[in-house]
Image (cartoon, helix red, strand yellow):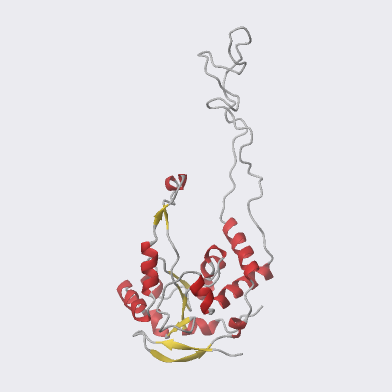
Amino acid sequence: MSRKVPVYSLDGEVAGEVELPTLFNLTPRIDIVRRAFLAYFTSQKQPQGRDPLAGKKVSVESFGTGREMARIPRHSSGRGGFAPMTRGGYKPHPPRVDKKIKERINSKEKRLALLSAIASTADYESVVKRGHSFDKAALKKLPIVLVDDVEKLAHTREAVFLLQKLGVYMDVERVKGGVKIRAGKGKLRGRRLKRKVGPLIIFSSGRAPAIKAFRNIAGVDAVGVDGLNIGLVAPGGVPGRLTIWSKKALMSISGWSR
């Protein structure tokens, strides 16, 4: 069954209609989407291990019995060493480089997951359930499709004005208001802040000038259609991201199928 959605101009006005590709009629497989995201997420992890001699390169010896002291290896000063319960001792079960930390997924399942995630972007209930904020009175049909001139935007202020005219900028404000400081030691390791995810803008090419205009807006991801992956379309393994397409990018996926 064919579905049509409006095409919006850079002024936020309806400039026509376009028929959605057939892949948007696909029944999303949420379980496959979650599996694919787990494979995508774990593929970015780096194996880590420990030196087998870590904590053991010390000259220590037990003092023996008769001193009313535990029989653990000790330095000449009396401080314990080498043993797992002592300061600087070796770890009994340290991380191993041969531990399996990456999940694998079949190529056909991976493709089905991406198509399912793309199809979910046209499901109004999935987008609302995911928590995105937008003008629900004006945008009753998803996904949002823009004229091809959007790919020529060169300045961030123009991109912000466009999102405001479309009624999507409130989702950016939701992202800005939801920034939190991460709990735990991740604050020391380059991931101090936690923030929500905003709209996804998809262009026909990864070299479109508008990518530089949109990528500086909080929570917004801008990408060419060839750069789509499950981490962008369904962050966290949850499908239904608020998505904005250029008309040319939408037409370029008309041949995609299972």
Which residue is at a point 46% across and 47% down the rendered structure image?
A: 186
- Is residue 202 toward the left or the right of residue 172 in the image? right
Which residue is at a point 40% across and 90% down the rendered structure image?
A: 14
| Residue 189 seen from this side | yes
Which residue is at a point 45% across and 48% down the rendered structure image?
A: 183
With respect to residue 32, does 73 lie above or below? above
Number of disc labels = 0
The picture places residue 195, in percent across and down from the top left corner, at: 42, 60
| Residue 217 seen from this side | no
Of the pair 130 and 58, the residue shown nearer to us: 130
Of the pair 255 and 115, the residue shown nearer to us: 115
* Residue positioned most to the left: 157
The picture places residue 176, in percent across and down from the top left corner, at: 36, 63
With respect to residue 192, does 79 lie above or below? above
Residue 108 image-quadrant placement: bottom right
Which residue is at a point 55% across and 70% down the rendered structure image?
A: 239
- Is residue 151 toward the left or the right of residue 79 in the image? left
Quadrant housing the N terminus: bottom right
The picture places residue 169, in percent across and down from the top left corner, at: 36, 73
Quadrant housing the C terminus: bottom right
The picture places residue 101, in percent across and down from the top left corner, at: 63, 51
* Residue positioned most to the top: 66
Of the pair 234 and 138, the residue shown nearer to us: 138
